[in-house]
Amino acid sequence: MLSVAFGQAKYYTDNLRENILRGIRQKIRRGELSAKAPLGYFNEPRLRTIEPDRKTFNKVKEVLRTFATGNYTLSQIADKMFSLGLVGPKSGKKMSLSSVEHILKNPFYYGHFRYRGELHQGSHKPMITKKLFDKIQKALKDNGKPRKKRKVKNFPFLGFAKCGECGYAITAEKQVKKSGLEFVYYHCTYKSKIQKCSQRGFLREEKLAEQIKEQCQKVSLPDVWRDRFLDKLKMWENENRQTSDLFAQNLKKKIEELKTKISRLTDAYLEGTFELAEFQQKKNALAGEKKTLEEKLSDFEREGNHWLELTRNWIIEANQAKNLALQENFPEMKNFLKKIGLNRQISQQKLSIDFKKPFNLLAKLPAEARGEAPSEAANSIWWRRRESNPRPKALPSDIYMFSLQFNF
Ligand SMILES: [Zn+2]
């Protein structure tokens, strides 16, 4: 009796399992995934299909596109998702790196889905192309792996400069002296396979810090000169407002004149004064001239006073550099020098930096220029005295000079 009963029960469950599997297979054949919808989609309860979720679809799309650029690590993209409001469905918190990775690898987003290891064509609306999906897979390979935290993180100037001889990275190491004192040294990694690097010297961290501070001071502007330059800039802004109004008015007037000429020419042609070929030639010349002026006007309207803004930013930034050096704020000094300095190199234990314009102008000035009290010597360095109208030497004397000097 019992064996019959058990047998029937097994028959019943086997049958049920078979029926469910059959249902799933039919669904798959129709291109429908029978599982929970991935992020960006939802399970439509009536039709039992998976549809784009209006609230998240475009956000997920943006995330996928962003990651495909290859400029993001997994944890950076997790931060981005969090900032877009894409959070873990249960936790409501930032998604784990493995969930993010799972999303980036899901073929569902380009219109397919995986079932039991096999890829099936889906009937749902794809979010991205297969091409973009492939880009994402490449980006994952290149920088998707969450980087292991550095074991020793007390090397603040790693990645700041390169070896001046072979161009390879500078590394750091800690050495413990017999006395128990610890020192950090920076030196070439000697990684070049082509060039044998002869730089054998190790640079003590304190010495490097000192040089970073010196470089920062070299491109800094004392308070007194910040104020004088900003005053000057205010005057220039007023002058510039008047001249630029005039400039724009002139351009507009010329454009109007050309329009009138073109319409008169057309009238004359219609009255039979010109042949078609002659008319076209004259008209094209005028239209070309008009186009040039119109472009000039729109360029001017777009960036007419841009140089004043750039100058102001520069004055303030250069003055900030002085404060950073004064406060011995090494992380910020490092960032600042990275921003304004190219070719940061160490060779013979000496740091050298090529400063970008216009910071290179400051770097060339003698040390007397940076005193806080405006001495006669400092005056003659900074100020170009021309009768009653002194102008800062480090700042060029007019817009034209300025654009030459600063490459705007
Ligand atoms: Zn080297």
Image (cartoon, rainbow, N blue to C red):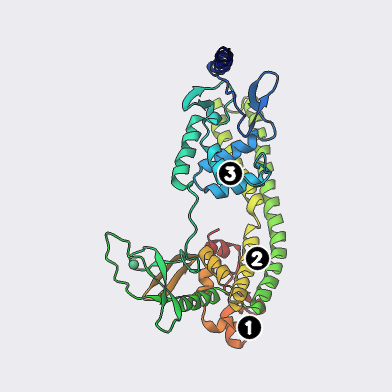
Q: Quadrant of the C terminus?
A: bottom right
Horizontal arrangement in the rendering, residue 50 relative to residue 218 (left or right): right
Q: Which quarter of the picture shows residue 312?
A: bottom right
Q: Which mark is residue 312?
A: 2
**Residue 254, percent from left and from top:** 66, 46
- Closer to us: 73 or 6: 6
Q: Amino acid at mark 2?
A: Arg
Give the residue displayed 39% in from the left and 63% down from the top: 169
- Answer above or below: position of 275 versus 383: above
Lower position in the chain sequence, tag 2 or tag 1: 2
Q: Secondary structure at mark 1?
A: loop
Q: Which quarter of the picture shows residue 193?
A: bottom left
Judging by the rendered image, the residue that carries numbered circle 1 is 372
Lower position in the chain sequence, tag 2 or tag 3: 3
- Few, some or many residues within 10 Å of mark 3 (<14, 14–19, 20+): few
Asked if the beta carbon under badge 1 is closer than 8 A to the nearest atom of ligand 1, the reply is no
Mark 2 or 1, closer to the camera: 1
- Few, some or many residues within 10 Å of mark 1 (<14, 14–19, 20+): few
Mark 2 or 3, closer to the camera: 2
